[in-house]
Image (cartoon, rainbow, N blue to C red):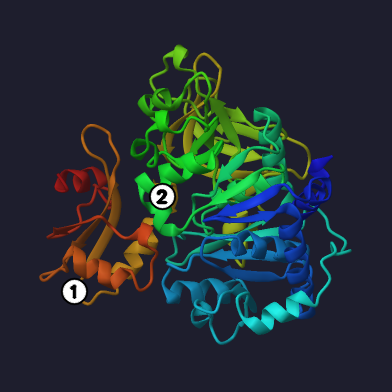
């Protein structure tokens, strides 16, 4: 059974079954499964020589291209877990991630090696000496014991304490997800997956390994191509992309009629509108609305969109095979259909917890009172209800202040903490302000101070520490932060002040 295998073992299977089939395509380059697997085996042997062992965390700092999945696959083959990092992130943030994860080795390229802290060794894949070293190593699959519960990767998400937190994910959850999707949508050789998202966003796990564990081809593009809707559409048409994973923000930017080969579109990250779901659905294309936090391995519930049903908004469906989803009220009991509650999810999709955060792990990963002894559930913090007709879960929002924007999770506290280090900011609150028509919101910084900084000054201050997606799109200067009678931030008053 594929559920008892590791990710790299499934890729090895395809390399043996169809060695010459395309595994990767990038700007004219084409790597076969045999080529990808052989290169990964050599790099894995090199990493083992450098001390990588079972569950060692190895950084991957790489631009888009074949070397990115190569590095990830090699780390897994060496028994380690990869830590994906985006070269566009500030140096301070990259340094924190590597230090917090105990990362002593980073696979990268010579142009990015300067961003690796002195405490970590850089393995530059484009360095001639490294290339000669790898060429002398065996291309055979490593004979290392592996288990699906081994750590596969560490993904960092925004943290409410002001620093990002690392989530520990294993092979089993990814294999469960990709195997289910392969069965559900008949995905396999001949399909082409688009890698659209950055490697430090967990959807990239589904894109990369959804392709490579099913015998499909992974289609990549440069960052400039993927950021330009016209160039992105042309890439998808020219490469005949059949499987895509999009956040809702991408949908209005592309013309579905110009992408005839696209047969499965998985959408997630934010609430999917009925208009866009209807627009993208066709007799030859399935729109699959997926939901899932990083802690539940990318996606854990889903529902295929059916325009004929005429729902006001698409549902996020039910738990995928082998997983559980419960709507739980304040007293810890399951809520009946039509009643709102917090969504708790469980099964092999769950992360082990947070790296070096035992208290937060215990708070968010709780014993499962509805399942087998020893089972756990993850408290998502999302408010949902089962549709009255009993055919799926309906997403309603957050029960806390966490923000989801363009598929990214943003803890306002992390942005606020950096804002407060600006010498002309006395107080700061960050929130998502939506227009009256309910359209896409704007991340807004509300600041106080007699000479508060402008938006450009705020960006200049924040971008040295935070990634681009956490930069506010607007700054509103207040005399003071409005409070409710019980001394909490009055977010309705903030929204009114922003209009």
Q: Quadrant of the C terminus?
A: top left
Residue 36 as seen in the image, left or right of residue 223: right
Q: Nearer the viewer, residue 74 or 233?
A: 233
Any part of residue 232 in sight: yes
Taking the spot 72% from the left edge, 43% from the top edge, the residue there is: 215
Taking the spot 39% from the left edge, 47% from the top edge, the residue there is: 406
| Image position, residue 185 (x, y; %) | 64, 29
| Image position, residue 156 (x, y; %) | 53, 61
The label number, if any, that marks residue 291 in the structure image? none
Residue 252 falls in which quadrant of the image? top left
| Image position, residue 255 (x, y; %) | 37, 33
Q: Is residue 95 above or below residue 341?
A: below
First reached walking from the N terminus: tag 1 or tag 2: 2
Residue 467 falls in which quadrant of the image? bottom left
- Report which residue position mark 1 lands on: 424
Any part of residue 297 in sight: no
Residue 239 as seen in the image, left or right of residue 170: left
Q: Is residue 52 above or below residue 223?
A: below
- Report which residue position mark 2 lands on: 402
| Image position, residue 58 (x, y; %) | 66, 71
């Amino acid at each position: 059974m594929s559920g008892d295998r590791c990710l790299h073992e499934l890729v090895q299977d395809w390399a043996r079954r169809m060695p010459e089939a395309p595994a990767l395509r990038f700007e004219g380059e084409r790597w076969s499964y045999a080529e990808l697997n052989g290169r990964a085996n050599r790099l894995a042997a090199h990493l083992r020589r450098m001390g990588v062992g079972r569950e060692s965390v190895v950084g991957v700092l790489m631009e888009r291209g074949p070397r990115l999945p190569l590095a990830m696959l090699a780390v897994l083959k060496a028994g380690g877990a990869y830590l994906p990092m985006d070269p566009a992130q500030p140096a301070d943030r990259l340094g924190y991630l590597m230090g917090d994860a105990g990362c002593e080795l980073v696979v990268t390229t010579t142009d990015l090696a300067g961003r690796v802290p002195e405490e970590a060794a850089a393995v530059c894949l484009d360095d001639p000496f490294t290339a000669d070293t790898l060429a002398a190593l065996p291309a055979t699959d490593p004979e290392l014991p592996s288990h699906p519960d081994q750590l596969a990767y560490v993904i960092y998400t925004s943290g409410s304490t002001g620093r990002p937190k690392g989530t520990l994910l294993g092979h089993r959850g990814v294999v469960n997800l990709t195997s289910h999707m392969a069965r559900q949508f008949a995905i396999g050789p001949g399909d082409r997956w688009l890698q659209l998202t950055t490697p430090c966003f967990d959807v990239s796990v589904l894109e990369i390994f959804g392709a490579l564990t099913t015998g499909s081809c992974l289609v990549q593009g440069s960052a400039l191509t993927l950021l330009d809707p016209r160039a992105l559409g042309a890439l998808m048409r020219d490469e005949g992309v059949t499987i895509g994973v999009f956040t809702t923000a991408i949908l209005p930017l592309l013309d579905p009629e110009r992408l005839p080969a696209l047969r499965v579109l998985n959408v997630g990250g934010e609430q999917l509108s009925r208009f866009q779901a209807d627009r993208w659905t066709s007799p030859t294309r399935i729109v699959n609305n997926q939901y899932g936090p990083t802690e539940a391995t990318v996606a854990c519930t889903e529902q295929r969109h059916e325009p004929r049903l005429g729902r006001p908004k698409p549902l996020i469906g039910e738990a995928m095979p082998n997983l559980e989803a419960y709507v739980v009220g304040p007293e810890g009991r399951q809520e009946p259909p039509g009643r709102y509650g917090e969504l708790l999810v469980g099964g092999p999709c769950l992360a082990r917890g947070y790296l070096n955060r035992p208290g937060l792990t215990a708070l968010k990963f709780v014993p499962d009172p509805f399942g087998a002894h020893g089972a756990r559930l993850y408290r998502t913090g999302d408010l949902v209800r089962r549709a009255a007709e009993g055919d799926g879960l309906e997403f309603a929002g957050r029960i806390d202040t966490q923000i989801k924007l363009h598929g990214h999770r943003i803890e306002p506290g992390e942005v606020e903490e950096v804002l407060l280090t600006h010498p002309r900011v006395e107080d700061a609150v960050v929130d998502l302000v939506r227009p009256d028509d309910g359209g896409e919101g704007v991340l807004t910084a509300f600041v106080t101070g007699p000479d508060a900084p402008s938006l450009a000054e705020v960006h200049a201050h924040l971008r040295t520490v935070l990634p681009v997606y956490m930069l506010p799109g607007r700054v509103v200067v207040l005399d003071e932060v409005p409070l409710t009678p019980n001394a909490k931030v009055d977010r309705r008053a903030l929204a009114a002040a922003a209009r």
